[in-house]
Amino acid sequence: MLTFDDKSVLRNCTLFRALDPRDLDQVLSHSAVLTLSRNQQLFAQGDPATQLFVVIAGQIKLSRLAPNGDEAVVQVFGAGDSFAEAAMFMGGRYPVTASAISPSRLVGIASARLKAHVLERPEIAFAMMASMAQHLHGLVAQIEQMKLLTTRQRVIRFLIDQSGRGDGAASFELPHDKSLIANRLGMTPETFSRMLAQLADHGVAATGSRIRVGDVGRLAKLLGDC
Amino acid sequence: MLTFDDKSVLRNCTLFRALDPRDLDQVLSHSAVLTLSRNQQLFAQGDPATQLFVVIAGQIKLSRLAPNGDEAVVQVFGAGDSFAEAAMFMGGRYPVTASAISPSRLVGIASARLKAHVLERPEIAFAMMASMAQHLHGLVAQIEQMKLLTTRQRVIRFLIDQSGRGDGAASFELPHDKSLIANRLGMTPETFSRMLAQLADHGVAATGSRIRVGDVGRLAKLLGDC
DNA sequence: CGGTTATTTGACGGGTATCAAACACCGTGG
DNA sequence: CCACGGTGTTTGATACCCGTCAAATAACCG
């Protein structure tokens, strides 16, 4: 059942922000709330796609699995993010596997129901398309990164992104396990660890999952040099 | 001006296939036809995004440019494909650069106009979302490739894809310059050339842009081995 | 506290990028 | 028809980044 806090997240999430409360209630009237423990799978690549999801709390990772067991993390979503909007148009199969990387709470919305709503209220379609556009942009950025940045540059860029600032000092927690971050950045955990160690010479101190950057601007300059 | 042949392409393209002819005419009533010569740019990364496009003939590449001039090709579209649907929801800026890699003909459709149509006919929104979903899937597949396949595997997979078959012999033309293909696959032209040369031992003969594969199934098996 | 999982560190080898030069291809103009 | 410049492709030699394997250490959790 949706709590009051749940609704507050949903009212402000990217996908539903533009909807008026009445429409939102309509959409949510038959939604299911799900709770996942760490590492629990939500759906697997190839499963029939019947719902899209909005994260209320926790973190969900979308990944693809190779026959040999290797995993490629495609995206990670947190509170307020929605995913699998595309699924309802992809011939009914999820193209990725989704699992929780921390205890999570989310709502699942039946695609069929949502389709019906779109026909009545096209504004919902705009919200979905905006959300999909954002995902597209994220994937494009990722491809760009992998194609024209070295591992060191990707790590630097990741740190700058996480710092949320353009210059000065910063301190923050890594959003999840280092090995998962390494995967997201397209490198091995070993390499990620080494890069982090190297950056100590440039004002980056890592103690556990806490990162302290002396000067973000200096990192940005380092990015340019190569 | 739209010729009869142009319309025939548009009627069958992924984006408009589901539309009834009357709606299509409506949508196209204020569209612009564009002709681009090889290497001519359609729009640049950062330009205000006012239109989406459908390719009638030729090929368009979407790429991102690094400050140092390096280029990352993100996708290549041919006749019947549409692109930049997402732009109308991305704050008004194209996130990539688009240019023709062969003489091309395309229609540009004003996003504002299309938005208005969606409000009247939500079915159009479904078509757009389906198209965006396909793009999403393509990008996910690309990320997966780069993350868990070696250069050789990517070349093999590319050849299998191009062959359009699952087994037996095949012969086909490469869709464009080898250096562009190399970029798409995330490797240098030199490496691509060498990989192709290596594959001669496995029934792949390349003479110019014509590829002859002795047995596609054998290639698929090779993919699995590593 | 013990056992499991993450992370670090080291040594090593191979796969790719890089640089450089030779070569093929193609449309142009003489 | 051939010479010619430009572009694209191939081939070779070299360097080095990064993945792999292995072991030690640290962090985590019941």
Image: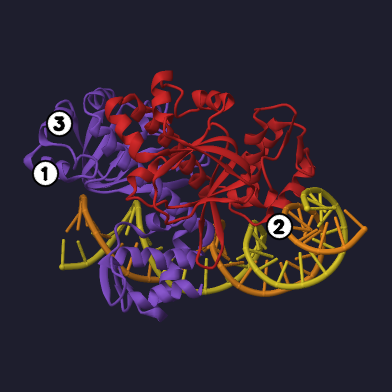
Chain colours: A red, B purple, C orange, D yellow
Residue B8: which disc? 1
Q: Is residue C12 above or below residue A145?
A: below
Residue B23: which disc? 3
Identify the mark nearer the N-term, 1 or 3: 1
Q: Residues within 10 Å of mark 3 (few under 14, many from 20)?
A: some
Q: Looking at the picture, how far across and down is residue B70, in whole percent?
A: 49, 46
Q: Which chain letter goes with mark 1?
A: B
Decide which of B181, A224 is in the foreground and name it. B181
Q: Looking at the picture, how far across and down is residue C5, in whole percent?
A: 72, 57
Question: What amino acid is found at the position of numbered circle 1 in the picture?
Answer: Ser
Q: Is residue C11 above or below residue B42?
A: below
State how many labels appear: 3
Question: What amino acid is found at the position of numbered circle 2 in the picture?
Answer: Glu
The residue beneath circle 2 is A190
Q: Is residue B41 above or below residue A180?
A: above
Mark in front: 1 vs 3: 3
The residue drawn where x is 49% and y is 47% is A143
